[in-house]
Structure formats: structure tokens, C-alpha cells
Amino acid sequence: MQIIISLDDYCKAYNLQIGVYRPLIYFVGSSELSSIAKEFKLKNGSFYPLPIYLPLRDKNLLDKVSGKKIDLIYENDLVGFIEVSEVYEPNKDDLCIDIFGTKDKAHPGVKYFFDEPKYFISGKPTIFKAPSFANEKHFMSPDQVKAEKLKRGFKTLAGFQTRNIPHRAHEHLQRTSLEVCDGILIHPLVGWKKAGDFNKEAIIRAYKILIDNFYPKNNVIFSLFYSPMFYAGPREALFHALVRKNFGCTHFIVGRDHAGVGNFYKLYEAHEMASNFADLLDIKFLLLREPYYCKVCGTIVSDKHCSHSKNMICKISGTTVRQSIIKGNIMPDWLIRNQIANVLSKQDLI
Ligand SMILES: [Zn+2]
């Protein structure tokens, strides 16, 4: 018997196998999905902030797969198998409130979750044919990143999650982390993202300019992170940190509205949650305030070291960059480096 899996499913199955989501190594079942959502816990009591689940995409198989070893098919290719322990119908309404704090489908993570099939299956996947991204130049597994960290002699490594091309605020956060850490893992997420975000090629192109021309190359590890976004805000900040710990990070950067979307979360809600859970995660958080450009200071600052009034400051955000690109507006160098702005176009947006 076989089931068809999506690219996100394939990606998650492969990540479970190579240790990206440790201590989780299998797709969760119903009780664990709910204990993660309600108590941030796996069934063995380990801290865990977001569920890794597998939807059953063929409802004709509903009564047939439980307790069986099922082949996993991706684009007509047999890529692995799963030993199915449970088939269940998650209570998506309840789960959304716990995970996202809302069940409003205007939230892209909520909509994605509701759009997934009605039934999920649990069990440990075995992938014997790695996804094509595993052979791409910019992909590194947790073991490869840890080996690189060792080779470069880093005692400390800061993880930087992004789904964007680098603008000046990102650069400020990255440089700040290098003041306290030996190296930085710039780890852009390139799994499922909402429409309007940047595509993978643009992110690689933009970061290549920044790293090759402006950063001390030996202090930067650049690798793509293949995993879908949830847009679950503060909870996802914890998840992003846990995952980066599996890649050898000792520190993790959390800026303004981490993994947030629209106005669903408070700007520094992720800072509060990270402070509350830091001990359980065994990683140091670099909780950094929003960088902006101050016309009086004449540089990128934050409200921790600039006292000037609101009308003197210019906000820096990925949204502004994306909107400027769509409208064809020229972007100032304080928003994004000219060298990077010059290589971006509307075609780079999903
Ligand atoms: Zn100022």
C-alpha cells in the first residue's frame, strides 16, 4: 500500500530523519498533537513548541493504513515508508486557538492548517531517497553545520532565522550577534511561505552580495533551511530556536515580531515567551529591539540607544522593501544596500 505526500510532507519526513526536529523523530499522534499545543510537551515530557504532523491525502485509505507499513510516494517516486501507528481527525478549531492564538483564516498559517486534509497519520518515517534539495549547493544538514562549526573553531554560534532578503535592520542584528558570538548561521527558511514573500533564488543572490563583499566570510555559515512556515509568532520563535540548537547554535536571535504576520501578535511577545522558556530550551536568546534609521543619529539604531522622536526615525521592514519593489520605487541605502536592491525585481516575489 502507498500514500502520496506533498513537498512539505517530504521535507518534514526527511527533517525528522536527519535530526532537524529533535527530540521529535516521528510524525505526532492525536494526544501528542494536543499536548504540544496545550502544554508545549511531547509525551515523554520534553519541551516542544510546534507539532510536526502528516496529513493523509487520500481519504479512501482511512480505514486501511493503521498499523501498516506504507510506502511514501512523492511525484511518482517511491522515496520511503512509514510505519503508521494512528489515523486520527485533529480538532483543528481547538488546535488553532492554542497554536496560533486565533482561528481567523486571514492568518496564513491558520488557513494553511485548515486547508490541509481532515485526517492525519502518526508514525516514524524512513526516507531512502533524499529530496533533491539535499544535493543543492546551499543545503547543509545539522551534522554538516556542526562539522563546519568545529572546523572553524567556533565555540559560540548565533542562529539567524529569516524568510527575507537582507535589509539594513537584518544586517544590524547579524552584526550585533557577531559582537558576542564567534560565528553566525544565516539560515533562511525556504519551505512553504505566504504569497508575497521572496523566493529562494533572490535570497541566495542577495545574501551572496552581503557575505562576499561586507562580512568576514569565515565567521558566517550560510545554509538554506527547508521547512514550512507556521506564522505562529512567539511559539514559532521557540521552535526556530530549538531547531537551530540541533544545528549547533548556542545562541538565537529574536527580533521584532518574530515569525509573526499582520497584527496577530504583539511586537515583543516572542521576547517574553523566549525569556519564559529559555531554561527549557538550553539556548541563549539574543533578544534584540527593532533597528531603525534615525535621521539625527545618522545611522541604524534602536530605542535602546537612540532617544529621538518618532518623526526623526525611518522604519525598516521587509514589507516596505517588498512594497517598494512592487511599485518600482527607488529604495534608500539606509533601507537596503544599493548593491542588493539593484539585483531584486518583482519576479523575485512568490
Ligand atoms: Zn537617534
Image: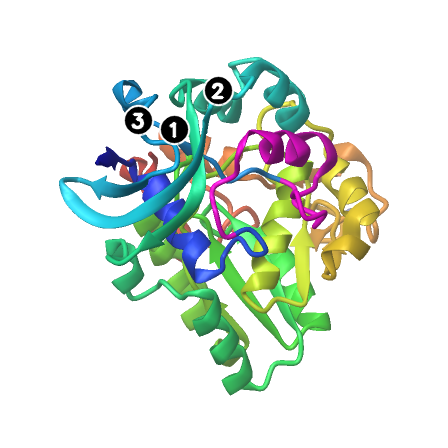
**Disc 2 designates what residue?**
89
Say the numbered circle drawn on residue 195.
Answer: 1
Residue drawn 74% across the image and 32% down it: 311
Is 42 placed left or right of 120 in the picture? Answer: right
Q: Residue 160 is drawn in which quadrant?
A: bottom right
Label 3 C-beta lies within 8 Å of the nearest ligand 1 atom:
no
Is 17 placed left or right of 179 in the picture? Answer: left
**Disc 3 designates what residue?**
64
Q: Name the magenta segment's main secondary structure.
A: loop
Give the number of callouts: 3
Residue 174's place in the image compared with 10, above or below, is: below
* Residues drawn in magenta: 25-49
Which quadrant would the N terminus be assigned to in this image?
top left
Residue drawn 40% across the image and 50% down it: 226
Q: Residue 232 is drawn in which quadrant?
A: top right
Q: Nearer the viewer, mark 1 or mark 3?
A: 3
Chain-order first, disc 2 or disc 3: 3
Question: Rounded to the nearest whole Å, what is the CA distance between mark 2 and mark 1?
Answer: 28 Å
Please name the amino acid that badge 1 sits on. Ala
Q: Residue 65 is drawn in which quadrant?
A: top left
Q: Position of residue 163 (x, y in %)?
A: 47, 45
Q: Secondary structure at mark 3?
A: loop
Q: Nearer the viewer, residue 324 or 312?
A: 324
Count neighbours of disc 1 (C-alpha within 10 A) and say few if under 14, some if 14 to 19, many if 20 or more.
few
Please name the amino acid that badge 3 sits on. Lys
Please name the amino acid that badge 2 sits on. Glu
Q: Nearer the viewer, residue 175 or 85?
A: 85
Chain-order first, disc 1 or disc 3: 3
Q: Position of residue 144 (x, y in %)?
A: 43, 73
